Image (spheres, rainbow, N blue to C red):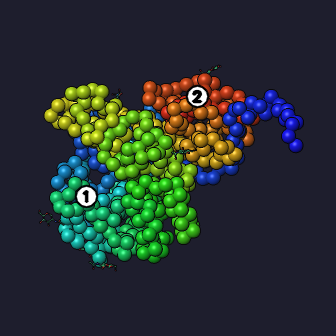
Amino acid sequence: MRGTPTVLSLAAMQAALHVRAATVASEASMTMLGFGGSGAWWPYDLYQFPDDVRTNLSNLLFLDTGMGLTSYRYNIGGGGVNVSNPVRAPETFYVSNGTYDWNADASGRYFLYAAQEIGGDDMEITMFVNSAPAAMTLEHASCSSSFANGTGDWYGGYVADVLEHFLVDEGLSKISYVSPMNEPDNNFGPSPCGQEGMEVTQYQRAEMITGLYNALVDRGLEGEIGILADESSSLSRATSEYADWLPEVIDMVAHLVHHTYDFPTDDSYSSYAADVAERFPEKTTWMSEVCCSLGEADGTGRGWSGGYDPTIANALMWSGMVYQSILVAGEAHYDFWTLVSNGIGCDPLDDPTCTTTANADGWTDGVIYYDDDYATNGNYELYLTKHFWAYKHFGNFVKPGSPLYPITGTDSSLLNSTIVVGTPSGGAYNIISMNPTAEDVQLELVFSPCVAPTTAYRTSAEEDFAELNGTDVVEAGDQGWVLTVSAMSQMTFVFEKASC
Ligand SMILES: *[C@@H]1O[C@H](CO)[C@@H](O)[C@H](O)[C@H]1NC(C)=O
Ligand SMILES: *[C@@H]1O[C@H](CO)[C@@H](O)[C@H](O)[C@H]1NC(C)=O
Ligand SMILES: *[C@@H]1O[C@H](CO)[C@@H](O)[C@H](O)[C@H]1NC(C)=O
Ligand SMILES: *[C@@H]1O[C@H](CO)[C@@H](O)[C@H](O)[C@H]1NC(C)=O
Ligand SMILES: *[C@@H]1O[C@H](CO)[C@@H](O)[C@H](O)[C@H]1NC(C)=O
Ligand SMILES: *[C@@H]1O[C@H](CO)[C@@H](O)[C@H](O)[C@H]1NC(C)=O
């Protein structure tokens, strides 16, 4: 039947040339929880900074004028026995069984109180542990040592005493979770060690969780504080070890949390999620720590590595990991590792441009950096990388309680890097989208209620969360609204519900 030319309507011709419309589902697939990161180990240094800088830092972390994070992980120190780096050796409250020094860890407590006081109503604080106090561990050290069999009740009582002190006696009402073993697969030895760490084999984890849970019950706190476990370093370890401990204590664990230092492919991340959904259907999983990857904006080259890359390319690489956790694994909560870092790898007083340039000597483990030599050179500047601005899109626009609406029906390359969330109050949609390519990309979205664009925000090589008029980057399409996501940028598009 060749020969008869097909007559396309103007609209169809435009559609063929233009983007294909994608539909925003009217039903949410999940409810988002928090975005945050850890208070380790920078509080030791930052506590020594001038008061106005400390206040500025707290605001940058916890207010919407900054990132507006809604999750903060406080590290309950183990006393740093055999840890050689004082910055990574947080003090312990433990003096002897049942006796505590609540004045210990002034630097950690300062930022813990900041999270409570400056963070919004939806802030949730997790207290996490790298190592028990040395007295309790098998080798009597805060690293290169192990959980000692038979100490579950002792250790659980100690952790519960710390939680009760801060939640009940000190009134830090935002403490919501406890994670009793951070990376139990690693003791970070040999001594002298670079950081705290206590090995807890998979055969010991049920004893530890049971001891802690019973201690929470004794104090009437089991309904207020959820236990997170087991913070395995990688997804592959988590799944291969769950069978050895989790079924015994599944009802005592609130959420299964993991790190992703194996930098999983989409396939392995989704099979992890499917495996958990099948074996432990009542439990949700989330990301509680990752850092330290180089790689390109589109995700190629990801993997554990030294090297400081503060540029938009690496910030988008990391944003791609955030989208992956949400879209591939259906995870509603995301924590990065250390929010603030001295791994800048260069001397900013010597070369002021070095903080915005990649180098091989630093680490991409923070979103805000400071000068390691502050004590001698008096440089108290805070350096924001593109990661700070990229994460601000999530922290500002995906608040706990935000419904996530799937997008279907598009073959857009942005499908794996765009999320649509409703505001918790229901009045608006926020669309966060990143474009890791060198060309602008358009995406046409069809919403079921009538909506209208208001503002938009863009982070790119040149711009840091620049505010735009929505009409500059959104236009009416044939069926919905056409969003232009600029080359090598992350953007947020705000739509309000409107009358039709
Ligand atoms: C710690 O003290 C409690 C009572 O306060 C006691 O039951 C427990 O046996 C003690 N544990 C150790 C290891 O001394
Ligand atoms: C801690 O350090 C001391 C002194 O160097 C050493 O004797 C001990 O073996 C170390 N402990 C561990 C668990 O490595
Ligand atoms: C501790 O208990 C676990 C679980 O029963 C066991 O596999 C392990 O061998 C014990 N470790 C020691 C040092 O006794
Ligand atoms: C806070 O720190 C940021 C980053 O260094 C800086 O741009 C800003 O001016 C500081 N704000 C105040 C109030 O000091
Ligand atoms: C998203 O999918 C595109 C192909 O459509 C691919 O090139 C890109 O690497 C993916 N990005 C991420 C962050 O996975
Ligand atoms: C955005 O631009 C439109 C016209 O294009 C204008 O009506 C509207 O007031 C502008 N909004 C803001 C917030 O400036």
Tell me where residue 364 sits by quadrant: top left
Ligand 3 is in which quadrant of the figure?
bottom left
Q: Position of residue 88 (x, y in %)?
A: 24, 51
Q: Nearer the viewer, residue 152 or 391?
A: 391
Q: Is mark 2 within 8 Å of ligand 6?
A: yes
Q: CA distance from mark 1 to mark 2?
A: 45 Å
Q: Nearer the viewer, residue 482 or 258?
A: 482
Instruction: Decide: is 178 above or below 123.
Output: below
Secondary structure, mark 2, is strand
Q: Position of residue 259 (x, y in %)?
A: 41, 56
Q: Position of residue 266 (x, y in %)?
A: 52, 54
Q: Quadrant of the N terminus?
A: top right
Q: Nearer the viewer, residue 4 or 492?
A: 4
Q: Which residue is mark 1?
A: 196
State whether residue 91 appears in this view.
Answer: no
Q: Nearer the viewer, residue 231 or 444?
A: 444
**Dot placed on the residue nearer the N-terminal end, 1 or 2:** 1
Q: Position of residue 95 (x, y in %)?
A: 20, 62
